[in-house]
Each structure stands twice: as structure tokens, then as C-alpha cells.
Amino acid sequence: MLIPIVLAAALMNAAMIAASAMSTILVSDRLSPGLAGLPNTAGVLGTAAGALAVGRWTARLGRAQALRIGYGFGVAGGALTVLTAVGAQVALLFIGMFLLGAGNAASLLSRYAAADAVPATRRGSAMSTVVWASTAGAVAGPFLMAPSQSFATALGLPAVSGPFLLALATVFGALVASTYIRSTHRADEPLPEHQPRPAESVRTPLVLAASVMIVGHLVMVALMSSVPVHTHQHGDGLGLLGVMLSAHTLGMFALAPLTGWWIDRSGARPVMLAGLALLLVSAVLVTQTGLAFGPALFLLGYAWNLCYLGGSAHLVSADQESKVESSIWTVAALASATSPWLYTLGGFVLLAGFSAVLALPLLVLVIRRTSPQAVGR
């Protein structure tokens, strides 16, 4: 049953967005604007660590119970952010965001629970449904932030605590929804539809699939982390920036069901190839900062979607899933920290060149060293 999995993922995404946005403002006001990025860094690192932890819990306890534990840590993190907002030490905020990151890891890995719950011929569509559900959280979270401040004020609490209360409520909702998730089999065992293969024949396509996911995420974060800097330097307002970010988010999530259908119909290999090719195209278009800039960000989002879901379709155990997810979020932290610096050196042209160096050789490797039987179905 996909409903509790999808609902929990959407609620957790809303919680993460609300807490991330407000934590940046809180640290900027209480400490320094230069330190405003630290809470989000803590959340990213929490997601990377949480992915490994959820993978281990899955092997020992089953997938459903592992997801519940992850969401439980997210609830604890949400509570700590509320305490910070009402006057506790700012250090609790960083701990809270780290724990919320663990809940976010559970949400991300829940796509494999969806894959377990359906026949083998629909695994791609099931995973894409969970990714698509993130659209609801991405849209609802920001829209509920202002009303949450009014709600907090009505309770006699500081207005800044409103979005954190929202995050706590939504992650708790995710935990409740996760109690209705049922395990089908132990996730450390190969899925039934996969036939045993020699170790080398498994290792090479697995490395390639993981590399496609990691490179797709790395390129996307590297380019998108510099978009706010670019718009600010060109005198564009927050309204235009919001439109650009919305276009990118739409590309990331809205077409996920199409990707899932494609995986189920044609296998993961053509989807990954298309993702890498689109990654290169969008990186080039981003350098054209005129009318093509907005569509380029949309295409960049969809390129990530193709790489992410295409690679995910090849992973067959909790150990693989958790290690790849952890790697993805570790490189995301690195990319978000270094991207603005690279942008100041050479603009989007340098970042596009960096993207091509990563994606082009990988595209060639996927074409030459894998077969349709080795990757996907």
C-alpha cells in the first residue's frame, strides 16, 4: 500500500523545507549572516549519516521499522528546533537540524519501500510516485510558513517559532503515517526478480548506476547553489528568483511519474543515458543567461530526476541504497560550499565546464561498458 509511504514522504519534505528556511533566518539574526548556512549544512550531514543508519536498521529490523526510527529521530530534531526558537541555546538548533536530516533520509529511502510493495514490473512507477509526492511538500511548506507564525503568536510564542512548530507537526505526521507501512521482505536480501550473477557482472553496473546518481546530484547542486548569487549580482528581485527556483523544482519532481513509466517500459539504462545527456545540455544552456535561463533550470531539474530514479532502479539491497544515498548528500554538502566560490572565479561557464568533465566521461562509460541486461530490466 503506497498511501502511507507517499504521505510520510510529502510531510517530511514540508518539515525540512520549513525548518531549513527559518533556521537560516534565526542564525542570521542571533549569530551572524555569515553563519546562516550552517543549519542547512547540519541538515545535509544529518541526511548523509541518517542514510547509513537507516540502511543498517533495515538489514536488522526490516524496512518499515527502519523508516519509523528515522522519522522518530526527525521528531526529536523538530522538537529541538522549537526549543531554540523559544529561547534555548542556538547549539540545539544545529543538533535539531542534524536529526531532522535523519528523518529526511528515511523519507528519501522510503521510495524503495514503495518498490517492495508492488509487482516487479511497476517498481519504477512506485519509486517515482514517492519522488513526485515531494512536490506537495515543496509547495505546501513555504505557503504555510506565514500562517504558522500567526498561529505561534496567538499561542503567546515568538513568531519565529511558527515554522519550527509547523516542521514538528508535519514530521510527527510522517511518523504516524509510517506506522501503517508494512514490510514485505528483509531489504538486505536481493529482490526476487533479480537472478544471481557473477560478482564482477554485478559490480560494474552497480558502480556506474551509483555514479550516475552522484554526478547528477553534484552537478545540480553546484549549478543551483550559484543561481541566487547570479540573480543578486544582476539586480533581479526575489520574485524572479522564486520563479526560477519553482521552475527547477517542477523539473525535479513533477515529471517523476513519466520517468517511472519509462523505467518500467524500457529499463533503467536508457533513462540514465537520457539523464546524463540532458545534464550536459542544461549545463550549457545555463551559461546563456537570457530567455533560455529559466527553461535551462527546468531541464536541469528533470536531468536530476532521470539520473536519480534511473540509478535507483538498479540498487537491490539496503546496503547499496543507504551507501549511495549517503554519498549523494555528502557530495551535496561539498558542492554547495564550493559552488559560489567557483562562480566568482569563472561564472556559469566554469561550472558548466566542471559539469561536462564529470558527466561526459560517465556518459561514454554507460554506453560502452553496460548492457541492457546489466542495468535495469
Image (tube, rainbow, N blue to C red):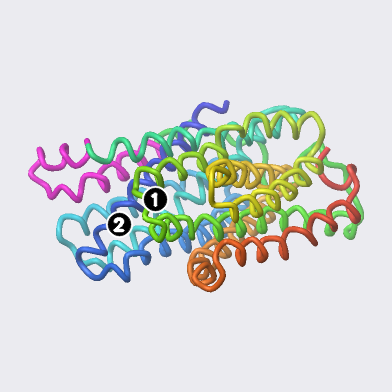
Is residue 65 something that shows in the picture? no
Residue 376 at what x, y percent from top left?
A: 81, 41
- Magenta span: predominant SS is helix
Question: Foreground residue, 332 or 295?
Answer: 295
Q: Callout 2: 10 Å neighbours few (<14), some, many (20+)? A: many
Q: Callout 1: 10 Å neighbours few (<14), some, many (20+)? A: many
Gap between marks 1 and 2, in whole Å? 15 Å
Left or right: where 281 falls relative to 167: right
Q: Quadrant of the N terminus?
A: top right
- Where residue 292 sits, quadrant-wise, is top right
What residue sits 87% from the left and 47% below the top? 374
Mark 2 sits on what residue?
A: 23
Q: Residue furthest left?
A: 156
Question: Foreground residue, 256 or 154?
Answer: 256
Number of marks drawn: 2
- Where residue 110 sits, quadrant-wise, is top right
Residue 46 covered by magenta stretch: no
Mark 1 sits on what residue?
A: 74
Start and end of the magenta stretch? 147-175
Amino acid type, mark 1: Gly
